[in-house]
Amino acid sequence: MRLIRPEIASKRAVFPGAEQLAQMQQLHELTRAERRLFNHMRIEIGLR
């Protein structure tokens, strides 16, 4: 952080605080079954 300009380091959209980090979820790779379900839902609503 010492090498990052203060105006960038202070932006919470770039470097969220502990409160925001606690509320976030990390994306994970979908399983084959989850991908099939996701694709089926996209087809059903017409998002090819």
Image (cartoon, rainbow, N blue to C red):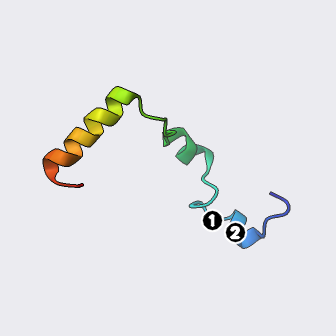
Amino acid on which the number 1 mark rests in the picture: Lys
Residue in view at x 21 percent, y 42 percent? 41
Q: Is residue 3 above or below residue 33?
A: below
Q: Which mark is residue 8?
A: 2
Left or right: 26 in relation to 44: right
Q: Look at mark 1 in the image and give the residue it sits on.
A: 11
Label at residue 23: none
Kind of residue sitting beneath label 2 = Ile
Q: Is residue 24 above or below residue 11?
A: above
| Direction from residue 46 to residue 7 in the image, left or right | right
Residue 2 shown left or right of residue 13 in the figure: right
Tags 1 and 2 in contact by the CB under 8 Å rule?
Answer: yes
Q: Residues within 10 Å of mark 2 (few under 14, many from 20)?
A: few
Q: Give percent across and percent down for residue 35.
A: 34, 35
Query: Which of 2 and 36 lies nearest the eye of the viewer?
Result: 36
- SS state under label 2: helix
Q: Give x and y (percent) for residue 48.
A: 24, 55
Element marked by disc 1: loop
Compute the Cα span from label 1 to label 2.
Answer: 5 Å
